[in-house]
Image: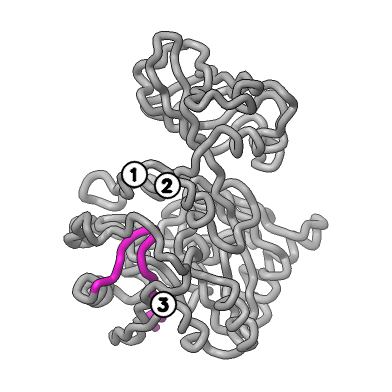
Amino acid sequence: MIPEIHIEDYAYSLDDSRIAKYPLPERDSSKLLHYKSGKVSEYIFRDLPSLLPDNSLMVFNDTKVVPARLRFAKPTGANIEIFCLEPVKPAEYNTAFAATDSSTWKCVIGNAKKWKGDVLELINPLDSREISDLSMTAVLEDREGQTGLVRFEWKGGFPFSRVLEICGTIPIPPYLNRESEALDVERYQTLYARIRGSVAAPTAGLHFTQAVLDRIREKGIDTETVCLHVGAGTFLPVKGSLVSRHSMHREPFVVSKALLEALRDGNRSVTAVGTTSVRTLESLYYAGVSCLEKGVPEDVEQWAPYTREYPYSTREALDAIVRYLDANGLESLSLGTRIIIVPGFRFRIVNRLVTNFHQPESTLILLVSAFVGGDWRTIYDYALSNGFRFLSYGDSSLLERAE
């Protein structure tokens, strides 16, 4: 049964002064709130390894933010900002980034009403020869509201990934109320970012330094990665009172067979770094159910966890995916998920969550509340009363799951 949740029950007062507009000089010097069984304690992020159990498993999201914000001009001079969301033609990220003359993307379009059908030229404010030689243009193929299909064309034979590096800017969150700066190229990216495709950083990972990662591994904690490309939907507010009417955007993810086997075979405690890692890992159960019942894994729909009872164990579900991969000679599972995690969700894989402090009335607050058994206000009241910095460049927390 889909839960009837009113989003206003997950509101709190967040003054603009509490939002971290810039990162701290050292990634691991942020505050760390530790929540366990209703009790809150305070540390520095570099203390994290000492709070994790030996012989556990830690899972990171190794997606990489792409400089996906581009600015074009109409022949009349009006500016049109285009924010690439996901590739359409070619549809696979790797293939789209490798394209050398044209690529079509689903985009958010600023000033969309002013773009009727003109061919737009890229703005080149510093008269860069490198940008000029690309002769980059944008053509609107279809539009619905603020989003549309945009075909980009360019010269020079560069792959689209390189074109974005030359022409684009890092799409920092809108609530920072500032333009991207040089420091964001490095700091709005995790140290272990590897696979291009996100338009927003998995910000829980921004606190990790090589020293912290080394200490985690020295403690005998295994580290694994998943890849979920974060879409712009992560910034969308819940519209209306009832959460049941909110639509989650599909986000593609990849999980290796080796990690699936480790999750299936081990009884180790799992720490997920970031809500994106949680959503990926918890989606695996429902992908496994699809394998058991239909013979193939399918995208995980938004309300799948709430619409029925499932008779399968977590081990059975994960084993079904592994058997499917073996039968098809695959080394990884590639799917999409729209899963929403709200109070009432049954967690099957993740025991511990590293995450930042999220916006009021957001789906991420709902996830945190579900994870800590509804006690999210204890966490946020402490953070607000003790000088914690909020949102993407803010401080961190280690949350232990309510049993």
Residue 239's x, y, as percent? Answer: 26, 44
**Label 3 Cα crowd, 10 Å radius (few <14 / some 14-19 / many 20+):** many
For label 2, the residue is 172
For label 1, the residue is 178
Towards the viewer: 151 or 176: 176
User: Depth-wise, is mark 2 or mark 1 nearer the camera?
Assistant: 1
Q: Is residue 374 visible?
A: yes
Q: Magenta span has 396?
A: yes
Q: Is residue 249 visible?
A: no
User: Depth-wise, is mark 2 or mark 3 nearer the camera?
Assistant: 2
Amino acid, disc 2: Ile
The secondary structure making up most of the magenta span is loop
Q: CA distance from mark 2 to mark 3?
A: 24 Å
Towards the viewer: 117 or 161: 161
For label 3, the residue is 398
- Residue at 49% from the left image edge and 20% from the top image edge: 142
Q: Is residue 41 left or right of residue 115?
A: left
- Residue at 54% from the left image edge and 20% from the top image edge: 138
